[in-house]
Image (cartoon, helix red, strand yellow):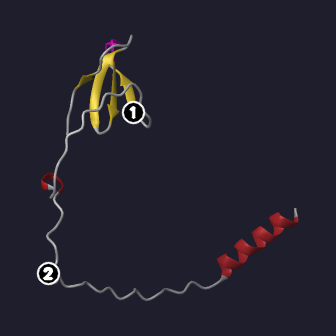
Amino acid sequence: MKRLFLALAGVALLMNSPVRAQAPAATVTPSPSPSASPKWDVNNAPGPKTTANLDVTEGTWMSLDVSPDGKDIVFDMLGDIYAMPIGGGEAKNLTTG
C-alpha cells in the first residue's frame, strides 16, 4: 500500500510541475567530401557475387494463411512467398526477389 501511495504521489508531483520547453538541438549537415565513396546500391552491389541454393525443411518467424478454397497454405520464407498443398508436399515459389 505504501508503494502505491508513493507512486501516486510521484505522479501528482509530476502533473503539478511546470513544463519547460527545450530549445531544439542544432543540426549540422555534413557536406560530402570529394573523396566520399558513392552511395550503396543494393541492386548493384560491388565485389564478387556468389549464388547459394537453399533447400530447407522448416523455418521460423514465418507468416502463413490458408487459401480461400482451403486446398493450399501460403507462407513467406526468406523474403519470398510460397504455396503448398495443405496436406503437405513440395512448396511452389510464387514470388522471388
Q: Write down the quadrant of residue 86 in the picture.
A: top left
Q: Main secondary structure of the magenta part?
A: loop
- Badge 1 marks a residue whose secondary structure is loop
**Tally of marks:** 2
The one nearer the camera, 74 or 11, is: 74
- Badge 2 marks a residue whose secondary structure is loop
Q: Is residue 54 above or below residue 43?
A: above
Which residue is the site of mark 2? 35
Picture coordinates of residue 35, whole percent (x, y): 14, 81
Left-right relation of 70 to 49: right
Which residue is the site of mark 1? 63
User: Looking at numbered disc 2 in the image, what kind of residue is underneath it?
Assistant: Ser
| Residue under the point 20% across and 40% down | 51
Q: Write down the quadrant of residue 63 in the picture.
A: top left
Left-right relation of 66 to 9: left
The one nearer the camera, 59 or 19, is: 59
Left-right relation of 14 to 97: right
Callout 1 crowding tier (Cα within 10 Å): few <14, some 14–19, many ≥20: few
User: Looking at numbered disc 1 in the image, what kind of residue is underneath it?
Assistant: Ser
Mark 1 → mark 2, Cα distance in angstroms: 44 Å
The one nearer the camera, 8 or 3, is: 3
Q: Which residues are magenta?
A: 68-72
| Residue under the point 14% across and 52% down | 43
